[in-house]
Image: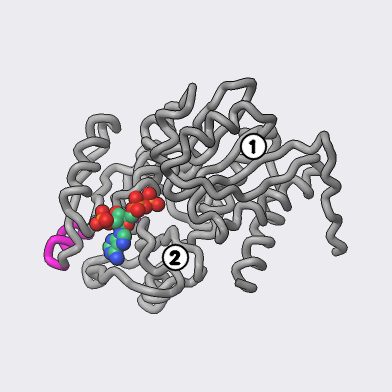
Amino acid sequence: MKKVQPQLSGKTAVYAVLGDPVEHSLSPVFQNEAFRAAGIDACYVPMRVAAKDLSAAITGLSHTSLKGFNATVPLKEALVPLCTKLTDEARLIGAVNTVELDGGKIVGHNTDGRGFLESLKEETKFQPRGKKACVVGSGGAARAIICALTKAGVREIVICNRTPAKGKQLASDLAHKLHGMKLGSSSLRMGELSRAFEGVSLVVQATPVGLEGRGLIPLPWGVIPKGTLVADIVYQPQLTPLLSEAKRRGLPTLGGVGMLVHQGALSFEIWTGKKPDLKRMRQVVEHALANS
Ligand code: ATR
């Protein structure tokens, strides 16, 4: 198919992704494709913004015609107090990954958790209701996924983290906010991890470990029940060391590309009120990953 170059004009709506670094972001690749496929006169550009400059950047951008932006590491948490309005979801997660700009209003959303759930729904047969999940990590991504899994009816979640105090803190913080959810925490030491993983149905790896194919957090494979779904938020490579190990053990797996594409599709919907062409978005991401 011949690729039609967008014709930028004075009427073109502009969106962005803010981060530091931002050079590796795939969001411009699939958001521009989504605008093109939908026939929307818009473009999406990367903007490097250092954490220390975020407040000044947001004030400045909110006085331009920029329509909205995504935020990535390390800006998501720092954006929360800079928004004039937050969705309940963004407030609960404590991080913003999508902003709508409208006449001086700065509305903060978080689509990461729902992006994960959409990917789970689209790509697996996993039914969250009543199940036990173990989430490895306690950063922004883990927090978004825990909130989303709670909403989807998961019964129990154990947060497994390298720094046990941080996992424990997150569990007690969320236990106050997510009424009815059984939340526990564990270190990554094998003995404790084995107890944490008893009866698990879903494992979510929500740390950067495995990025570029490097690193694998040892899991208590012996106690992980047959049929447990192993998900990794890392998408470069698509088959991470964890997913490769899970596959080798005959367990179903879910890679991180789906979450990436779905969180972006939800941002697109917030900005345009339209559902994007998910298939095209995914195709261009997979093409970019294969050629990077
Ligand atoms: P994000 O907000 O993008 O999820 P983050 O806030 O930097 O990222 O969180 C990173 C998570 O990955 C943390 O839970 C971190 O563990 P610590 O709380 O102990 O720092 C976890 N993490 C990062 N590198 C890790 C590693 N090599 N082994 C285990 N956990 C790691």
Residue under numbered circle 2: 253
Question: Which residue is painted at 36% across and 66% down in the image?
Answer: 209
User: Is residue 201 visible to us here?
Assistant: no
133 vs 107, left or right, is left
Based on the picture, tell me whether residue 244 belongs to the magenta stretch.
no
Ligand 1 placement by image quarter: bottom left
In primary-sequence order, the first of circles 2 and 1 is: 2
Q: Quadrant where the N terminus lies?
A: bottom right
Residue furthest to the left in view is: 191
Residue under numbered circle 1: 269
Q: Label 2: few (<14), some or many (≥20) within 10 Å? A: many
115 vs 92, left or right, is right
Q: Where's residue 60, x and y in %?
A: 58, 31
Q: Which residues are magenta?
A: 190-202
Q: Where's residue 41, x and y in %?
A: 80, 40
141 vs 222, left or right, is right
Q: Image quadrant of residue 30?
A: bottom right
